[in-house]
């Protein structure tokens, strides 16, 4: 459920459940972007945070260097995949599934691409109220599992689909079905997704992931250890390539020396959050 009311110069927002996590990610990403040595340039995100009346710190705790930078680097890693796609397909379409209050469009826009937001009706309404309008942006108010949004995509100029901070909240069978549908509908396209490891998924299902301030992470029923990503090939025969995407390099010892090389460290490489790039073959749409 989402509600938004005007409170002077700010908009008061009330969210619960999975929808509330979009405020978590906005808060940490924007707080990192405020820093003079920020790893992510996100002025629209900072403006958006300032426009919302919500007890961010009281609810989520202080946005310390680790959590804030981690969220920003995840966003930056997705940004780089979209920019790489746009280098090859400058008039292509980027589809952001479960976009929440991400401000990625304004970070990667090349002036030519098309952007499609797919999110629940109440979140699409929040975006329309809080974010600027751009002619090349459209939104479909539905679940990512609803195939209606796929009918709004023209794959002829290239398609990249992102699922940032979304799939872990779905059931495993739903994740596999969504990947299969993308592979069938978007030949030659790319899907970029992130996942939590199985141990973390299990902890959220038991309600054990929480902040000192009392925020409890919603259950994340889908977890995937990084070493298991090869299994995604079985979702659809038009999946031709699956790649691990290293986290962008950040600031400080951990985000400079450890996190970008976590896929090479035996103790942690299968127990870490991961970002996966899936490429689809040129098969005919609908096969």
Image: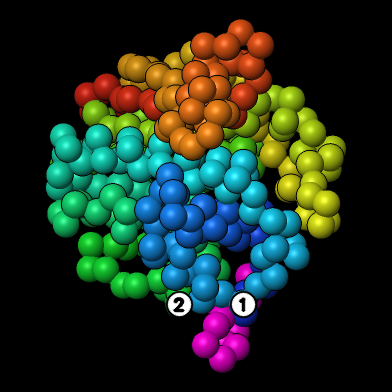
Q: Is residue 280 above or below residue 250?
A: above
Query: Does residue 55 appear to the left or right of 37 in the view shown?
Result: right
Residue 102 showing in the rendered view = no
Q: Which residue is mark 1?
A: 53
Which quarter of the picture shows residue 192? top left
Q: Residue at the far top: name it.
A: 266
Task: Name the quarter where the N terminus is drawn.
Answer: bottom right
39 in relation to 245, above or below = below
Q: Is residue 265 visible?
A: yes
Q: Secondary structure at mark 1?
A: strand
> Where is the C terminus found, in terms of image quarters?
top left
Pointer 1 and pointer 2: residues touching (CB < 8 Å)?
A: no
What range is drawn magenta here? 2-11
- Compared across the picture, whether 57 is left or right of 87 comes to right
Depth order, front residue of 281/161: 161
Say how the picture is coloured.
rainbow
- Mark 1 or 2 closer to N-term? 1
Spot occupied by residue 33 in the image (x, y as percentages of width and height): 46, 55
Is 218 in front, or is 281?
218
Q: Secondary structure at mark 2?
A: helix
Residue at 62% x, 20% y is: 225
Q: Local crowd at mark 1 within 10 Å, few (<14), some, or many (≥20)?
A: some
Q: CA distance from mark 1 to mark 2?
A: 14 Å
Residue 129's label in the rendered image is 2
Image location of residue 276, percent across then percent down: 45, 27
207 lies left or right of 285 = right
């Amino acid at each position: 459920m989402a509600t938004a009311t005007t409170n002077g110069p700010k908009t008061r927002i009330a969210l619960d459940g999975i929808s509330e996590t979009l405020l978590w990610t906005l808060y940490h990403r924007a707080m990192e972007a405020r820093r003079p040595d920020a790893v992510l340039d996100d002025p629209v995100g900072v403006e958006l945070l300032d426009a919302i009346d919500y007890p961010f710190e009281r609810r989520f705790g202080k946005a310390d260097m680790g959590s804030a930078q981690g969220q920003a680097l995840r966003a930056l890693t997705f940004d780089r995949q979209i920019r790489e796609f746009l280098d090859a397909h400058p008039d292509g379409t980027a589809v952001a599934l479960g976009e929440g209050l991400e401000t990625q469009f304004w970070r990667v826009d090349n002036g030519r691409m098309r952007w499609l937001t797919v999110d629940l009706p109440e979140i699409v309404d929040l975006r329309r109220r809080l974010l600027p309008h751009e002619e090349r942006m459209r939104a479909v108010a539905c679940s990512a599992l609803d195939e209606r949004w796929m009918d709004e995509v023209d794959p002829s100029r290239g398609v990249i689909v992102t699922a940032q901070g979304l799939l872990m909240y779905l059931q495993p069978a739903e994740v596999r079905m969504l990947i299969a549908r993308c592979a069938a509908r978007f030949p030659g396209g790319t899907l970029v997704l992130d996942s939590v490891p199985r141990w973390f998924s299990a902890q959220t299902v038991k309600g054990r992931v929480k902040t000192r301030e009392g925020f409890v992470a919603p259950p994340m029923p889908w977890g995937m250890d990084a070493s298991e990503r090869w299994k995604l090939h079985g979702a659809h025969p038009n999946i031709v390539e699956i790649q691990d995407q290293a986290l962008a390099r950040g600031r400080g010892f951990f985000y400079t020396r450890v996190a970008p090389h976590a896929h090479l460290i035996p103790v942690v490489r299968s127990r870490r959050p991961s970002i996966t790039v899936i490429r689809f073959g040129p098969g005919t749409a609908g096969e």
